[in-house]
């Protein structure tokens, strides 16, 4: 018995010595406990960080999400595949996301709510049937928008960069709030652009001289009328919704639009000649009625402003690329596109309207020119 016991002890000693010789150690209970505790602490920290992240997200959207639900009807005269239509859609998406669903924008495109002037008449007349709209900056000219009218003066902006220097400035905010300050009942939220505006005609046009005597469609805007008269043509007021048939039936010989709008509204079907004079950069803005603005909470108003900033940035990112893409499509489809190599005669022809349209705001207009 003693021999067996001694044998067992010796075997155990030999195993221990063997383990020690191989550099292997038995588990240390205290180290395992420390690791477990560290893991618990790390997990707790991650959970807390996640909670804080969720809290911040809730603060960003939750405030507006907790507000009463509201639907804003928004009008757009062009289809949604245009630069302005894409900008509208982005704005709608941002507003609904940032408000946590408390604001829904009912975007009515392709002129189903009427022309820009029709929409403005409805918005300024009250009643709440149209709350918001994307409009051309010059559309406010006939409604007392003296500052906004400067943006439609021919050959004001030397290029896109020049326009965006203005749109991102404090001066732009002054322009956006002008109608509200004048008691018109609407205010601007943000600026964008839809590309340069060019003339298109039923008959082929190779130069400025070919426009003389033509009946060119204009909106009811004094600056646009003056520009067309300066070019030697006859300004003819036609509703945008009736322009296609007016071109088709000979009521007018041509009109002017940004390139993307020209194609999306199928004008090449009836007026397949495009002359790239770039007389105006199509400045746009999104406006909202004071009535609609006042029924929003402060959180919701902030959502609209933040979404507007991002939608404006998006507009800047897509506009030039979309314009070039559409121009190439037009050329491939057989549109007669004429490049204007010397814009000086066009500028000279518009000299009188430029002077008369800016004489009451010379200093302000010069500030815009100096932003090149």
Image (spheres, rainbow, N blue to C red):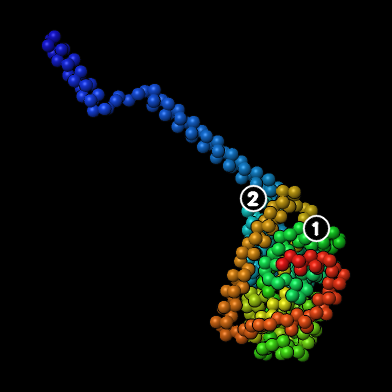
Residue 290 got which mark? Answer: 1
Can you give x and y, in whole percent of width and height, for residue 40 in the image?
47, 31
Name the disc covering residue 261, or none: none
For the residues labelled 1 and 2, the Cα–Cα distance comes to 23 Å
Q: Residue at x 68, y 54 (%)?
A: 306
Task: Please state the horizontal and vertical placement of residue 182, each as a whole percent of the image.
Answer: 86, 61
Q: Quadrant of residue 77?
A: bottom right
In the image, what residue occupies the spot 86% across and 72% down? 359
Q: Is residue 130 left or right of residue 11?
A: right
Left or right, 229 with respect to 58, comes to right
Q: Nearer the viewer, residue 345 or 89?
A: 345
Above or below: residue 32 compared with residue 320: above
Q: Secondary structure at mark 2?
A: loop
Sequence order check, earlier mark of 1 and 2: 2
Q: Quadrant of residue 104?
A: bottom right
- Image quadrant of residue 138? bottom right
Q: Is residue 324 above or below residue 182?
A: below
Q: Which residue is mark 2?
A: 100
């Amino acid at each position: 018995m003693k021999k067996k016991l001694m044998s067992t002890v010796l075997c155990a000693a030999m195993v221990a010595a063997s383990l020690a010789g191989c550099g292997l150690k038995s588990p240390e209970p205290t180290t395992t406990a420390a690791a477990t505790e560290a893991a618990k602490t790390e997990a707790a920290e991650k959970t807390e960080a996640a909670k804080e992240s969720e809290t911040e997200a809730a603060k960003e959207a939750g405030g507006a999400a907790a507000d009463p639900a509201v639907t804003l009807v928004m009008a757009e005269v062009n289809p949604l595949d245009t630069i302005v239509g894409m900008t509208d859609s982005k704005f709608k998406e941002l507003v609904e996301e940032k408000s946590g669903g408390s604001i829904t924008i009912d975007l009515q495109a392709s002129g189903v709510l009427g022309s820009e002037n029709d929409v403005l008449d409805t918005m300024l007349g009250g009643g709440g049937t149209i709350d918001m709209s994307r409009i051309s900056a010059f559309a406010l000219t006939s409604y007392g928008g003296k500052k906004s009218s400067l943006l439609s003066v021919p050959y004001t902006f030397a290029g896109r960069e020049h326009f965006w220097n203005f749109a991102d400035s404090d001066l732009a905010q002054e322009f956006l709030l002008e109608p509200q300050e004048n008691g018109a009942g609407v205010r601007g939220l943000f600026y964008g652009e839809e590309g340069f505006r060019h003339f298109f005609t039923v008959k082929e046009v190779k130069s400025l001289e070919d426009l003389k005597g033509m009946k060119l469609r204009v909106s009811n805007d004094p600056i646009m009328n003056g520009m067309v008269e300066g070019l030697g043509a006859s300004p003819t007021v036609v509703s945008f919704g009736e322009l296609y048939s007016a071109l088709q039936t000979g009521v007018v010989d041509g009109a002017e639009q940004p390139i993307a709008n020209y194609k999306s509204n199928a004008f090449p079907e009836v007026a397949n000649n495009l002359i790239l004079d770039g007389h105006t950069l199509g400045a746009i803005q999104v406006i909202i009625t004071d009535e609609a603005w006042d029924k929003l909470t402060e959180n919701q108003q902030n959502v609209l402003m933040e979404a507007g900033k991002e939608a404006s940035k998006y507009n800047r990112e897509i506009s030039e690329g979309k314009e070039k893409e559409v121009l190439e499509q037009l050329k491939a489809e057989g549109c007669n596109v004429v490049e204007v190599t010397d814009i000086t005669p066009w500028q000279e022809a518009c000299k009188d309207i430029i002077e008369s349209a800016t004489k009451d705001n010379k200093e302000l207009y010069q500030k815009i020119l100096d932003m090149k």
